[in-house]
Amino acid sequence: MPHPLPDALSSWSEAPRVRRMNERAIRPEGRYVLCWLQQALRARDNPVIDAGVRLGNDLGLPVLVYHGLREDYPYASDRLHRFILGASRDLARECRERGIACVQHVDRADRREKGLVYRLAADSAAVMVEDQPTFVARWQSERVAARIDRAMLAVNAACLVPPAILGDDIGSTTAFRRRHQPLRGDWLVAADWTAKVAAYDGPLPFTSDRLDVCTDADLDRFVAAAAIDHALPLSPMFPAGRDGALVMLERMMDEVLPTYATTRNDATQAVGASMLSPYLHFGVIGPREVMAAVEAAIAPAASKEKFADELLTWREWFHYQALTLPAPERYDRISEWARETLAAHAGDPRPEVETLDALLHGETRDETWNACQRQFLIDGWMHNNLRMYWGKRIIAMTPDPEIAWATACYLNDRLSLDGRDPSTYGNIAASFGGGSPGREGPAIYGKVPTRSDGSTRHRPGGPAWLAAAATRPRQTLVVPDGLPTALYLSGEPLV
């Protein structure tokens, strides 16, 4: 059995967010409490930092926040790198405002560091990390927790309601909503904890990159010096950092929320989606802050309720699911009935199979699918209503259902700013067989329901919108010789 939480955290109102990742002891003789952030890149209303402050206050130690950006993570690109660096810069600035030290390292040709988390942990009393259930954040956290000789605690910073208080027996979205909804009001307010110990200014095992004083040009130079995919450019639709998140939040409240209940499924409308998912994925903004803005906004109750259902039911349901899965990005997470029916039809003729090159660049024979894919390729994001069509059509456009799954995840993870996330894997899984089986349908799909493009094509101006969206000028990317099927089929980490 894991050791109980330290008293400073067990008495905390948000203790259900915290779990031990190993059975090592807390070392009060350490120099600081280390908060190692990978995706929760905000300084305010960040339960990871707040838990660190509580423990540090109890031990009489300062908190040290660390964020590092390697250049060898899967799908590293200018798009992802620059978005992350913008968030990290603002994290450092806001930590300084809270009186907390924040140190950073950006891997690049002239400055590479190995094992920095281990070296920083060696001087710590304990290590705090966000409880991320997918992709690199999960792999690295589990690896570090198994190797260090002091306590490591994971703190959920992504959800409004801590998944741990919901129990482990929820099997459907309806049941999740029924249990989750009555608890939301209890978690809508949180206060930053004040560090009682001065910011750490002691020795470090490396020279920190001072992102807090960097200009945009400085961050661009970091990106240019990294050994990453430079062919995938930044998304002009999503400015990086805290300011970008706040601009998108203001847009949501002023332009999107008033008509959200009626326009959210219309991909042809510029104000049909919140477009907050990249900022939520990288933790630049949290669900509490978003919900506070929703409550204060002038908008119909129906729109507020629908948005809350999307943010708090569906998003947190996917997080809840991911926490219970050994590998949320793996094909076997989809329903057993779906895998069985897709396997039974795996040998069906597939006249619509496309090359990976055509799929990656949105150059297939399906105009609607190309319109969807160009959003991923150019914008680093896709409208939610388009994602279901996109995901279901991949099943017919690839050689077999397992390759279809790996292809969908690969395109999502490489191109989208909100890829590699419990929500996006959950959405793909829903395309492949969410809910109950339907009647035996057309070849290839079996009992997996198909989806037409009618919800977009049959809208006023829909055909013209699709034609324009499918032919947007796009960049050319390197096409890999093969898909990273080990990750998506067997669950083997790529790093």
Image (tube, helix red, strand yellow):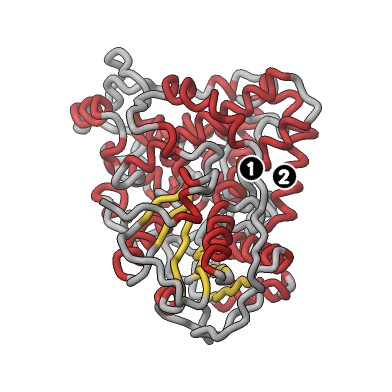
In this view of the protein, which residue sits in the foreground, 384 or 196?
Answer: 196
Q: Residues within 10 Å of mark 1 (few under 14, many from 20)?
A: many
Identity of the residue drawn at 70% across and 55% down:
242
Q: Can residue 360 be seen in this snapshot?
A: no
Which three-letter amino acid code belongs to the residue tagged 1? Leu
Which three-letter amino acid code belongs to the residue tagged 2? Met
Relative to 272, say whether 482 is above or below.
below
**Left or right of residue 125: residue 338:** left
Q: Which residue is mark 2?
A: 248
> Residue 381: x percent and y percent?
57, 45
**Residue 349 circle label:** none
Identity of the residue drawn at 41% across and 80% down:
114
Give the quarter of the image for residue 307. Answer: top right
- Disc 2 element: helix
CB-based contact (under 8 Å), mark 2 and mark 1: yes
The Cα–Cα distance between marks 2 and 1, rounded to whole angstroms, is: 7 Å
- Disc 1 element: loop
> Residue 470: x percent and y percent?
58, 39
Q: Which residue is mark 1?
A: 276
Looking at the rendered structure, the number of numbered marks drawn on it comes to 2
Label 2 vs 1, first from the N-terminus: 2
Identity of the residue drawn at 46% across and 43% down:
16
Identity of the residue drawn at 81% across and 27% down:
298
> Looking at the rendering, in which quadrant would you find the C terminus?
bottom left
> Residue 455: x percent and y percent?
57, 21
In this view of the protein, which residue sits in the foreground, 237 or 493?
Answer: 493
Q: Residues within 10 Å of mark 2 (few under 14, many from 20)?
A: some
Q: Can residue 83 be seen in this snapshot?
A: yes
